[in-house]
Amino acid sequence: MLASVSRCNRISLLFLIIYLSVRVQSKVKDAKLIDGRDPTRDEGSFMASLLRYPGRQLICGAAFYTPTLLITACSCISDAAYGTEDDFPEQSLDSLRVSAGSKYYVEVDDNFVLLEVAELIAHPQCEYDFYVDMWKKDLGIVVVKKPVNRSIPLQYISYPHPDQYLHSLLSLFEDEGYWVGGKKSCYVFGWGSTGYMKNRNEFEAFDPIAYLQTRAMQIMFPDECQEELCQVSNKVCKFWPSSQRAFCAMAKEPGRGSFCDGDVGSPFVCDGILYGIASWNYECGTSVKANIIYELDIMFIDAFKYLSSSLCHQTDFLFLLILFVATIIV
């Protein structure tokens, strides 16, 4: 059967078979950033918001890395994010939009554009672990139907080459300036609440803010992070970030933390380079300051980067895809 179709179509068909096993639909998850500041003109130009229409409900943030692909968190787009299908029926992709080009996630200036969503892709190893009350391999990709117009002031976020990522990450961890108490900072970006209300056992974040915010972050020492996690619950205490290719960060400036009520999907950027994706925070950092950041899987990210180009002109696409799937199996 495969012999009767073109080489390009055979590659497309093979990819489709593998790809359908990791495709997921979306559920809503609010994105919130506490005590942030307005970014400068050159900061955060890679950011976009994932919205649900009608109503412009903010789901989470994401970062463009090609004209049609955005990196975000799996927990933003996974069916399991809010429980069973009976409790939360599937969301249609037709109801989702990506806003880009503007630091507002609502239409305020001429740079604002809305893009339709074509697909949502979760990392094959992403799952919610009820044993530790935490997402694992919290990485996902949003695919838009049409590339962003070149006239829109949008930049693509940079990340290390697959051969250099682990070395770059190790160099980052070896630099004491990026650790808590040091003089250097990494940054997260997002829209969302600038405040919250806590009354007895009830916690509620305020409505999202329309203008993009950023917050300086520093890497936490593993022992201190674990102490913070153990303050949340016995389950969360069993989650060891380093064993899941994750690490902890906290806000550099004193205050109320950084993420709030699930500010997932925010890129963790150091010196203009993407090193991780924000995954978890407990109650806006009111008592627990630790924020979980997942390391990147460059093979996963790049596999779909190749897909977004012309398959017929990418002679190494099939090899890269098979190599990525092989690493998952192994």
Image (spheres, rainbow, N blue to C red):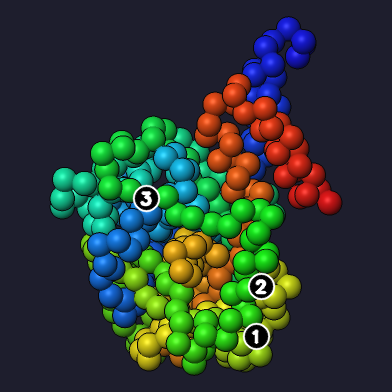
Residue 176 placement: quadrant: bottom right
What's the CA distance linking mark 2 and mark 1?
15 Å
Residue 36 image offset from top left, x and y in percent:
31, 76
Residue denoted by label 1:
222
Closest to the camera, between mark 1 and mark 3, is 3
Identify residue type, mark 3. Gln
Q: Is residue 48 above or below residue 194?
A: above
Q: Which residue is mark 2?
A: 170
Element class at badge 2 = helix
Query: Which of the numbered marks, if any, corresponds to residue 155?
Result: 3
Q: Position of residue 319 (x, y in %)?
A: 74, 35
Rendered residue at 53%/31% (across/down): 309
Q: CA distance from mark 2 to mark 3?
A: 26 Å
Q: CA distance from mark 1 to mark 3?
A: 33 Å
Q: Is residue 214 left or right of residue 55?
A: right
User: Marks 2 and 1: which is nearer the front?
Assistant: 2
Q: Position of residue 293 (x, y in %)?
A: 56, 70
**Three-letter code for the amino acid on which mark 1 is drawn:** Pro
| Disc 3: CA contacts within 10 A as few (<14), some (14-19) or many (>=20) | some
Residue 134 pos. (x, y %): 61, 70
Q: Residues within 10 Å of mark 2 (few under 14, many from 20)?
A: few
